[in-house]
Amino acid sequence: MARKSKKKGPGAEKTRSQKKSASPSSLLTPHPSPAFTKAWEGRFTESTDPEVERFTSSFSFDRRLYRYDIQGSIAHTEALGRAGLLTEEERDTLIRGLKEIEAEIAAEGELIQAASADEDIHMHVERRLSEKVGEVGGKLHTGRSRNDQIALDLRLYLRDETRTVVEQIRSVQRALIVQAESNLDTLLPGYTHLQRAQPISLAHQLLAYYEMLERDRSRLIDSLKRLDQMPLGAGALSGNSFGIDREGVARALGFSEVTANSLDTVSDRDFIVEFLSAASILMMHLSRWAEDWILWASSEFGFIALPDRFCTGSSMMPQKKNPDVLELIRGKTGRVYGSLLALLTLLKGLPLSYNRDLQEDKEPLFNALDTVKSALRLLADLVRQVSFKKERMLEATGEGFLLATDLADYLVLKGLPFRQAHKVVGKIVRRSLEEGRPMEAWTPAELQAFSPLFEGDVIDCFSLAGALQRKRGPGGTAPQSIEAEIRKIKRKLKA
C-alpha cells in the first residue's frame, strides 16, 4: 500500500534540518519539488502531455550513467570555482551534495526507477541537488548543456566499460593458454568445408581462438584513443561564454585532450559506433567458436563433454543435454549486430548538431555491452571446465584420408611437380574407396603401381605424429611451433 505524504501549504518549505534528515527514500518522490519542475518550463504555457512524458523519458535506462554524471558534475563545479563563478563555500556545498546523491542512488539501486518523474538521469541529479542545497543548486548548470553533459557521461562510461571488456578477453585467453599447454600432443582432424582435411594439434585449434580474441582486444584498445577527448565545455553547440578551463576539466577526468569543435562534439557518436563495430566482430568470433563446440559436443563428433552446469535438458526427452550457453552466444551475436545497425541508421541522416534522436544511442550500447560481458564471463569458465575426449579425437584422425597431402608432398620431394603428385594421390584415394581399404594399408610395392617414385621410406608419410612434425614452421601445428608461440604469448601476458 502506498504511503501517503502529508500535504503542505503552497509556500511551505523544508527547514535545513529536515533536508539533512531526509532518507534515500525521498528519491522515490513521484512529483517534482515545487522549487524545481522542468528546467525549460519558462518558454511553455502548458504542461507536457503525460503520454509525451512517457515517450520522451530516458530515465529508465540512462540511470546507469549516474556515477559518471556526478563525476562530470563535480569536475565542472571545480571549474566554475576556478573561473570565479562560484564562491569556495558554494563550490564545496555543491560537491558535498553531489556526493550525497551518488551514495543515495547507489543505496537505492533499481528502486529509483519506479516513481521518478524526471525525464533523464541528468535532471534527476540536478533536482535532487536543488532539494538538498537550495538555490545554489541552480548554479551547477552554468556554462553547460545536457548536450555536452551526456557526451561526457557516455565517454566516461564507455571508457570504463571498454577496459572491462578488454580484461575479460584476457581472462578467456589465459584459460585458452592453460588448455593449449595441456593438449600439445592431442591430435584431432582439422576441417575445411566441414570435411576432415589434415591432422592438427588440439592446442593449435585453441590458439586459433586466442588469435581471434587478440585482434578483438587490439581493436578495443585502439578505440580508446578516440574516446580520449573531453567534450564538456562545448555547451549546447557553440561553446561556453564563461572562460571555463576545459583543459583543467580534462585533466581532472583523466582525458589527454579536449574536443576541437563544439558542433561536432555534441553530435558525435562515432565512438559508440566504433565500439559496437569491434563488439560485433568479437561476437562473430565467439559465435564461430561456439559453433565449433556445439558440433564437437554432438554424438556425431563426440570431441568434448560440456559441464552439466553449462547445459540444460529437454522438457520432453529425458536423455537430452543441450549446449544452451553456446547456442545463445551464437544467437545473441545477432543482437549485437542489431545494436550496430541501429546506431548507424540513427546517425545517417542527422543534420548538425544535436537532435533528440541521439537519445536512442544508449539502449543499443547498453544492450550490446551486457551481452558481450555475459558471453565472455561464461566462456572463461567454460574453457576452464570443458573436458576433451582425446581418444575419440584420435580415432577420428584415422578416417577421411587426412594424410593424403603428406603423400603428395612426399612425391614433390622426390622431384614430381605438385599438380602431378596431387593427381597420383587422388587416384590412390579413389582406389582405396573402391576397395574399402585405408590408404595406410598400401605397401610401398603396391604404391609403385601409381608412381615409380614411391620407395620404402614412404611408410613415414603414414605417421600422424610425423605429419605434425613436418608443419614446424612459424604458425604451424607442430608441437615445437606451438610451444614457441605459447612462450611468446606468455611474455605478452606478463608484460
Image: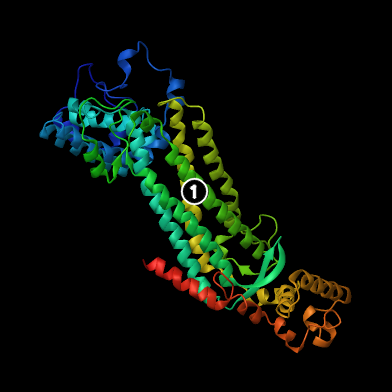
Image quadrant containing the N terminus: top left
Q: Is residue 247 in view from this perspective?
A: yes
Relative to 287, residue 105 above or below: above
Relative to 164, residue 233 above or below: above
89 left or right of 11 in image? left
Residue at position x 79%, y 74% in the image: 425
The percent coordinates of residue 341 (x first, y second) are 55, 38
Residue toward you, 336 or 370: 336
Image quadrant containing the C terminus: bottom left
250 left or right of 369 in image? left
Q: Which image quarter: residue 255?
A: top left
Name the residue that disc number 1 marks: 278
Crowdedness of circle 1 by 10 Å Cα count: few (<14), some, many (20+)? many
Q: Mark 1: which amino acid?
A: Ala
**Residue found at the very far right of the displayed protein:** 434
Residue at position x 37%, y 39% in the image: 154
Q: Is residue 297 in view from this perspective?
A: no
Q: Which image quarter: residue 65?
A: top left
386 left or right of 44 in image? right
The percent coordinates of residue 215 (x first, y second) are 49, 56
Residue at position x 72%, y 81% in the image: 462
The percent coordinates of residue 308 (x first, y second) are 57, 64
SS type, badge 1: helix
The percent coordinates of residue 203 (x first, y second) are 56, 71
Relative to 397, residue 95 above or below: above
118 left or right of 73 in image? right
